[in-house]
Amino acid sequence: MRWTTCLAAAAVAVISEASTLTPPVIPLAVRTPYLSTWLGHARENPWDHWPIFWTGQEVGLSVLAAVPKSNTVFPLLGRAQDSLPKSGETFNVSYPAYIGATFDASTTNLTYKIPAPKSSQEPLDVVLSFLSPVTPTSSLRQAIPASYLTVEVSGGFDLDIYVDLNGLWVSANRDNTIRWEFGQEHVEGKKQNAPLKTWKVKRMTEQLLTEDADRGEWGTLFFTGPSDVQHEAGTSALLRQRFSRTGTLQNSVDDNFRAIMDDEPVFAFSKSFELNGTSAAGGSHTIASSSQLPIFKIQSSKTVLDFHYHDFATASKLAGNYSEQLEIDALKSGSEDYKDILALSARQVMGACSFAGTPDDPLIFFKEISSDGNMNTVDVIYPAFPYFLYTNPKWLAWLMEPLIEHQLSGQYPNDYSMHDVGASFPNATGHPDGNDEYMPVEECGDMLIMGLALVNSLKYDTEPASIWSAAGANKYVESADGSFSLHIDSDGMDDSFGGPISAKGEKQARKWIEKSYRLWKQWTGYLVRETLIPSNQLSTDDFAGWLANQTNLAVKGIIGIRAMAEIADLVGETEDARYYQNISEVYIKRWHDEFAFSRDGTHAKLAYTWYGSWTTLYNLYADALLCFHLPSSSSPRFAQDQKPLLGSKPSKTAFIDEKVYKTQSDWYHNVRQRYGLPLDSRHLQTKSDWEFFAVAVASKQVREEIVESIALWVNETSTDCPLTDLYDTEGDGGFPGNSFKARPVVGGHYAFLALERACGGKAVEALSFLDDEPAPEFATGRVEL
């Protein structure tokens, strides 16, 4: 595998609608674990700081604008002005009016006004538009880790634009020596397109599959622009000063290879916008990071660059379609705040993904960014999976496949699900000694819940889990081995995923389960033995430490057993299905009646024997997502005659009693803090993914007030990194100790949107009893340790 990064140019800016939130950091070019460039200090001017990698390390990306007739240069992005003398030059440094940043799921726009050289003229508008397209109907495009930077200029006077990058794109160590070359050539067979200009930059001595400070230490940076730009490589200060004096570059290359910060070499393009009193002119750039993409056939990196560059209009349209529908769904189910939280989360989820494999057996490798750096961590995929259900369930299958494939190989010795496929991304070395992080109930429950959710997304009747997965042609039924192959048409669009129960979808689901049925059964057997009264172990919230008898963990495992009943029924294993159904019914009754709740019945306890404690019961979400809460007629055929097991009065929900939903919803209303819902009674810290899981199955009142609190946190938090999922709900909303950042678990923010499309659209309707009366007010207290 070889990683590359590229910057290309295209033609039109994509303009986002206004954003209501002001997060501390905003995505710019975020596509993979190694192409992850952000606007830090996003509440300040973009020229006050350098852009950052997700770790917070500075990345060299600067943009300058010059007005020829006024001899004035304006920094737009990055601290390029540090290279410009304050006096004794033929130019002056001034600053534009920064209008602000807007963003949607794929785009971030930075908007400026440049003062006119004459008082009789209006200021000129400049937009830097960063597009990392989310394209659920085109996995091919999503697999190309590339982002566009579009520069749009409109007004009545001329403007020159300059963009440069430095060697920090290819190494985290400023002392490493880099080499570079420039090229301009046609892609074979496509000479009708003007030849693109490309910088190629890489380390002099690469370290294959090695990270330094989470940066890949191998591969090539491609920085590509159109044929009509000027280019130059050389010392950063010299190039920036030359552009500031002349408004252009010299089309020359400094070939003195050196360390990244030794007379800092940069690789630049400039372009003149000659408006001549016209209303607008445009030009654009792309930032990307790609492997030698093996899920489709390519001739060379030039072919990929050319396709990606000239595909801007299509990629932009597809990304716009996703953003527009996301906005519609978010506003329908939430608020302006919810819309912006979802938009802010999308690129962060996809930024942990690396598409790999072959067309017959595609895979996605997933980095556990910032916490452990593990690869395809089960309990990181799990909080993110509502995003994939909503966006493209096929990608969830590709995420789970490395875990299933590895365990089918017999290289993992334990009888519970493995935690990850490798301790250090990007090396999928597994755990042949069985000593991965010990979360056995967590991982088994996660896999079973996600497995049934994926099955349900395949065998839908009228309402697909994702409207995009139902798009495209309907030609292919999956291969006999049950893999989810990639089929695309001549325009690079995916074949449909799943389908009506009687046709394609059920066949796909059955084949997928059949090839690994022994694993699903093995994991369920472990849960039958261990989940009702969990031993001392970790849950996904491992930062909170080991704990026995975890109430929330136990219910996840029980729901996992219940999920296996439906999985077994799908493949005709009727005896297994009946057995697991009965076990889950017995366990959930005991969990409810004997273990889970406080003596006064007002809330679930953190642990069975920890009296006075309470917990956010976020695993309740899976009961509703998998449709277990629907009336018994929606249960498997072998369970249709089951009588209600909980309480003397029939519950409105079929598996977990409606009282659990109502009790927890009321409790969340009463323990909410300034910035949201604490995770449990031990601390005031919370996790945003679990907040959204919890409120997705709470009343509308509770959901709205907690989303409002989370939005307030986004606007006021003192954290200084890409959106964290772990924060304090009081004080300055900062880190509670662990500094999680840029983690893909924010896919959990999509929990309510995924729920709205579950069960053929009936999942949320079946929870309408939660809105029958407002949450009562009662005294609560936080348990101090």
Image: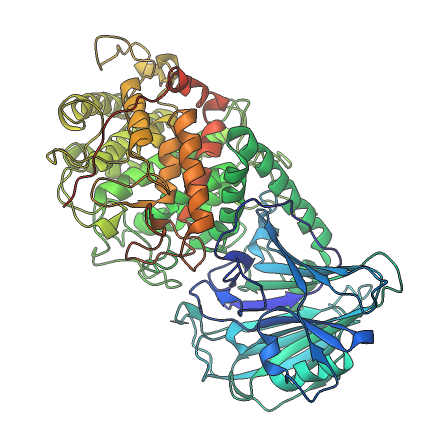
| Residue 453 shown left or right of residue 309 in the figure | left
- For this rendering, which residue is in front, 68 or 366? 68
| Residue 428 shown left or right of residue 73 in the figure | left
Q: Quadrant of residue 277?
A: bottom right
Task: Kindly identify the residue that appears in the image at 27 percent across and 47 percent down.
Answer: 541
- For this rendering, which residue is in front, 247 or 195? 247
Residue at far bottom of view: 256
Residue 654 drawn at (x, y percent)? 32, 17
Residue 272 drawn at (x, y percent)? 79, 71
| Residue 501 shown left or right of residue 647 in the figure | right
Residue 32 drawn at (x, y percent)? 50, 59
Task: Kindly identify the residue that appears in the image at 24 percent across and 38 percent down.
Answer: 522
Classify 395 as above or below 119.
above
Q: Quadrant of residue 621?
A: top left
Classify 705 as above or below 103.
above
Q: Quadrant of residue 673?
A: top left
Residue 418 drawn at (x, y percent)? 27, 49
- For this rendering, which residue is in front, 131 or 468? 131
Q: Does any portion of residue 139 appear in the rendered image? A: yes
Classify 593 as above or below 58.
above
Q: Does any portion of residue 479 appear in the rendered image? A: no
Colour scheme: rainbow
The total of numbered circles placed on residues is: 0
| Residue 26 shown left or right of residue 581 in the figure | right
Task: Kindly identify the residue that appears in the image at 22 percent across and 41 percent down.
Answer: 441
- For this rendering, which residue is in front, 380 or 575? 380
